[in-house]
Every structure is written in C-alpha cells, then in structure tokens.
Image: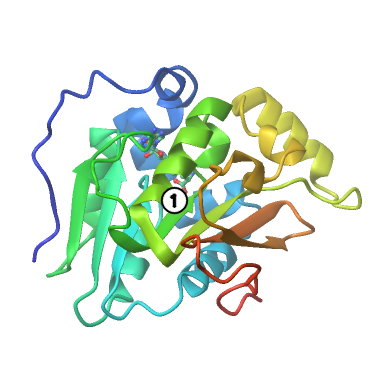
C-alpha cells in the first residue's frame, strides 16, 4: 500500500490556537519546514541527543510484527521512515497531524511501497475506534500543548491503544540540578515554548486519564534527566497491576 495523505475532511483553517499562535514559526511556514527538517538542526535543538532519543523511542516500541502502530503528530527528521522500516508481517503505521503542510512534508520522506497512511486529525479528537492500535508513539508533542489539550491528547492515545498495548511518550523532563544546561534550557523554553515547563513541574502520569482499569507506567530519563521516555500500558480492569519494567533496551 503506497504512502499517501488521505483526503482532507476539513480545511486547514481549524488549527488549534496554540499551534498557530506559538508554533507557526516552527511548523506551519514552508521556510520553517525547509529549515528545521535537517538532522544537524534537530541534533542542535536536542543538544546532541537526537539519534539517541530516536533509537530509544524505537526500541521502546518493541517488536513490530503484525502490529497496528499509530504516531500522533509528525516529526522532523527520519524517525518516521525508521519506524516504517521496522514494520514486519501485516503491520501498518498511521500517522496523524493537524497541519497539512507537515503531512505533505512527511509524505515526501516516505519513499517506496510502505504500509503507512497519513491522516489529518486533531490529537484531541481522534477518529479511530477504542483499542484499534497495538502501539502508539508521541515524540515531543506534549510539551507544546496547553495542559487541557495535553490531557485530551493522552486520553485519546490511551483510548485508541488496546489493553496490553503500549503508548510511548518522548519529551522534556526536569533536569537534575547538576545538569549544566538546566538554566540555559529553562531560559530557552520560557522564551519559545510557553507550555514546556509544565513537564518540569509535573509528571506525565499526572496528565493521564483515570480509567476503570489499571495502567502500567514506567519512565526512563536521559541526559541528566532533561529528557524522558514514558511507557504506558493500558490494561483491562482484570489486567496485571504493577508490571512496570521499561520495555526496550535503552542505553
Ligand atoms: C510532534 S510536535 C514536535 C516535534 C519535534 N519538535 C520534531 O519535529 O522533531 C510537532 C507536530 O505536532 C503537530 N501538532 C501539534 N498539535 C497537534 C494536535 N492537537 N493534533 C495533531 N497534531 C498536532 C504539529 O502540527 C507538528 O507537526
């Protein structure tokens, strides 16, 4: 099945206000896409950790044989092509984003005959049924969202991931006091990313929905705690509680 952007159901004039207001410079302008979608730029923004975080995210996704995989929001760089390359058997990947320009850009990067579908969707209102996916990935999306949007996004991620499946979240985290970039990052985030510091003050688990069943949640941090990968396993009410070993080999 060739990669392709599904026909849009709505015009691109219903972008979330926070995205247009605070992130147009990064995601919505063609020059932004041209500038940011380079590995050295991403590596600079992530202080040399781009490859390491991508590898850790992919490892945390676990085996991708006969799996339905969802990526919520496009990302610059080659994370999605690498994820697509890991699909085996009957696996498929759906990537959703609210910005058409980002979906078009991703489509250009997906070459060959891949089982990947791109759809214009708002992360807060996904048009997928409950438990449709085995694995769901969110890579540096949550820190860009206001708290109520972050809650809605996580509620949707958990809803569309089946009990026993896995939601992998990669994002910022409160760095240790000894982290030499702590104060620099605080200044940069406060200046450019108005909602990012939330993730220094609160845990991602605080934004997860209260479900009827239990959820196994585990966290790994990187680069003196500046970054985190959180794994959430939605479970049925009868599911095993407390299974919290972090999936995947993380360096
Ligand atoms: C995943 S985040 C940050 C990614 C990271 N900085 C990178 O590119 O490596 C950026 C993406 O999230 C998308 N986005 C933001 N809010 C969204 C929402 N509510 N629903 C779907 N996509 C959203 C933006 O359109 C953009 O493509």
Residue 183 locus on image (x, y percent): 83, 37
Mark 1 burial class by Cα count in 10 Å: few <14, some 14-19, many 20+ = many
Q: Which quarter of the figure is the N terminus placed in?
A: bottom left
Residue 5 locus on image (x, y percent): 14, 46
Please tell me whether residue 226 is drawn above or below residue 69 in the rendered image: above
- The residue to which callout 1 is attached is 158
Please tell me whether residue 104 is drawn above or below residue 50 in the rendered image: above
Mark 1: secondary structure: helix
Front in this rendered view, residue 46 or 202? 202
Task: Name the quarter showing ligand 1.
Answer: top left
What residue is rendered at 46% in x and 51% in y? 138
Which quadrant of the figure has residue 131? bottom left
What residue is rendered at 30% in x and 34% in y? 98
Is residue 75 among the parts visible in the rendering? Answer: no
What residue is rendered at 15% in x and 26% in y? 10
Front in this rendered view, residue 42 or 203? 203
Q: Is residue 229 shown left or right of residue 221?
A: left
């Amino acid at each position: 099945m060739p990669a392709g952007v599904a026909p849009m159901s709505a015009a691109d004039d219903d972008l979330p206000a926070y995205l247009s207001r605070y992130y147009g410079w990064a995601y919505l302008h063609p020059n932004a896409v041209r500038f940011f979608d380079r590995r050295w730029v991403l590596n600079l923004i992530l202080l040399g950790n781009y490859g390491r975080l991508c590898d850790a995210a992919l490892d945390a996704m676990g085996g991708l044989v006969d799996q339905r995989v969802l990526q919520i929001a496009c990302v610059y760089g080659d994370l999605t092509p690498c994820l697509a390359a890991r699909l085996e058997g009957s696996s498929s990947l759906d990537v959703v984003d609210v910005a058409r320009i980002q979906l078009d850009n991703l489509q250009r990067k997906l070459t060959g005959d891949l089982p990947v579908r791109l759809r214009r969707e708002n992360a807060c209102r996904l048009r997928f049924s409950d438990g449709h996916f085995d694995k769901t990935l969110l890579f540096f999306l949550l820190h860009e969202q206001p708290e109520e949007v972050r809650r809605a996004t996580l509620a949707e991620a958990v809803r569309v991931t089946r009990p026993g499946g896995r939601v992998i979240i990669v994002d910022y985290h409160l760095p240790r006091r000894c982290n030499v970039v702590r104060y620099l990052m605080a200044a940069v985030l406060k200046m450019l990313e108005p909602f990012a510091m939330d993730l220094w003050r609160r845990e991602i688990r605080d934004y997860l929905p209260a479900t009827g069943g239990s959820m196994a949640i585990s966290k790994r941090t990187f680069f003196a705690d500046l970054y985190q990968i959180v794994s959430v396993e939605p479970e049925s009410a009868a599911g095993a509680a407390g299974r919290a070993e972090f999936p995947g080999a993380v360096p």
